[in-house]
Amino acid sequence: MIGRKALGKKSALPQPVRNVYVWANRNIGRIDPRPRVLPNFVVAGTQRGGTTSLFIYLLAHEQVLGPRRAKGVHYFDTNWHESDAWYRSNFPLQSTIDQMARESGTTPAVGEGAPYYMFNPLIPGRIHDLMPECRVLMVLREPLDRAMSHHNHEVKRGFETLSMTDAFDAEPGRLAGEVEKMQADPNYISKPHIHHAYLERGQYADQVERYFNLFGRDQVLVMDSAKLKSHPEETVRRATDFLGLKPMSGVDYPLYNQRDRDPVSPELRERYGHVFEESNARLRELVPGEFTWL
C-alpha cells in the first residue's frame, strides 16, 4: 500500500499511479461488501467557530473514529445527490466497531463535521431522517466576530471581492430567494448561501431551535467557542461526557485555522451589532448561562 508520505511528494510516483491510489481511497468503501456503520455524532457548526479544532481534539480519543478522508463527508449538503450507501461507505466497518466495543466495554463514537450542517435549514431534517439517534455538537462564536472572520476567510479563498462593510450590506440581496431555490430543488447548491451569509449565519437561535425540535435537547450539545479556546480540556471533557466516553488526559490542544486580525471596532459594532439582538436574546433563553458574549 502506498503511504501518505510518499504521496506528499508529487515527483515520487507517476501521475497515473497517484490517480489510481486516489480513486481507490475514495471508493474502497463502496467496493468492500462488508457492512459499515453510520455516524452516531456530528459536529454541525458554526463556521469559523472552532468546529475543526473540536473535531480534531475528539479524534485524539482512542474511542472516536471519523471518516476515511476529512472531518466532513458533506453528504447532507454538497453530496446530497449520492446514496445512503455512498455515505455509509466513508465510515468504519461494523466489525471494527464491534471489536473496539468488546475490548473497551464502551461503544465507540463515530462522527463527522461540517459547519454548513447547522446553517442550511434543510440539513437537520436530512440528518434526523437517516440517523435519528445521532448526537449533535455545536460550537458558537460571538456573531459579529464570527462574521468578520468569515469574510476574511472567503477573501483568502477567492470567493469574495467586496470589502467587509460592502459585503455585509450586499448580503440581503445576495441571499434573496436562495433558500426557496434550495427547497424547490434538493440538489441545488447555493454559492451565496454558503459563502456570503456573513451576518445571517450568526442568527443562531433559529438554527439551534431546529435541532432541538427534531432531536430533543438531550441529543444536542451547544458550547461557547470562547470557552473551547480558553479552557479546551474542560470543554472537550463536556463533549466526551456527552458522547458517553471516558475523559482524555495528557492531550495537547493547539488551535487550528487561526488567523490574526483586528478585533471588532466600536464603529462596526455600532453599525451591525443590532442585527443579532433578537436572536441573541432567544439564544440566551435556549441555552442559558453558556455564552461569555451574551
Image (cartoon, rainbow, N blue to C red):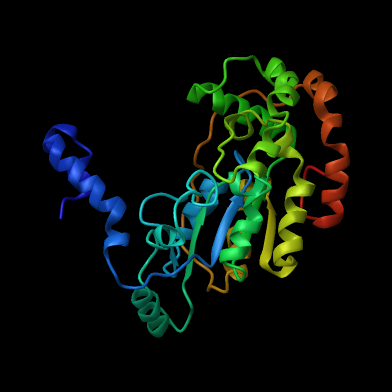
Residue 30 locus on image (x, y percent): 32, 60
Up-down relation of residue 41 to residue 74 (above or below): below
Residue at the image position 13 percent from the left and 42 percent from the top: 17
Residue 223 locus on image (x, y percent): 69, 54
Is 78 on the left-hand or right-hand side of 140? left
Up-down relation of residue 60 to residue 146 (above or below): below
Q: Nearer the viewer, residue 4 or 255?
A: 4
Residue at the image position 61 percent from the left and 64 percent from the top: 129
The image quarter in which residue 104 lies: bottom left
Residue 233 locus on image (x, y percent): 57, 58
Residue 161 locus on image (x, y percent): 57, 15
The image quarter in which residue 32 lies: bottom left
Up-down relation of residue 259 to residue 98 (above or below): above
Up-down relation of residue 100 to residue 154 (above or below): below
Q: How many marks?
A: 0
**Residue 136 in view here:** yes
Q: Nearer the viewer, residue 137 or 39?
A: 39
Is 167 on the left-hand or right-hand side of 232? right
Residue at the image position 78 percent from the left and 21 percent from the top: 268
**Residue 288 in view here:** no
Residue at the image position 36 percent from the left and 56 percent from the top: 68
Q: Nearer the viewer, residue 220 or 82?
A: 82
The image quarter in which residue 134 lies: bottom right
Q: Quadrant of the N terminus?
A: bottom left
Point out the residue furthest to the front here: 184
Q: Quadrant of the C terminus?
A: top right
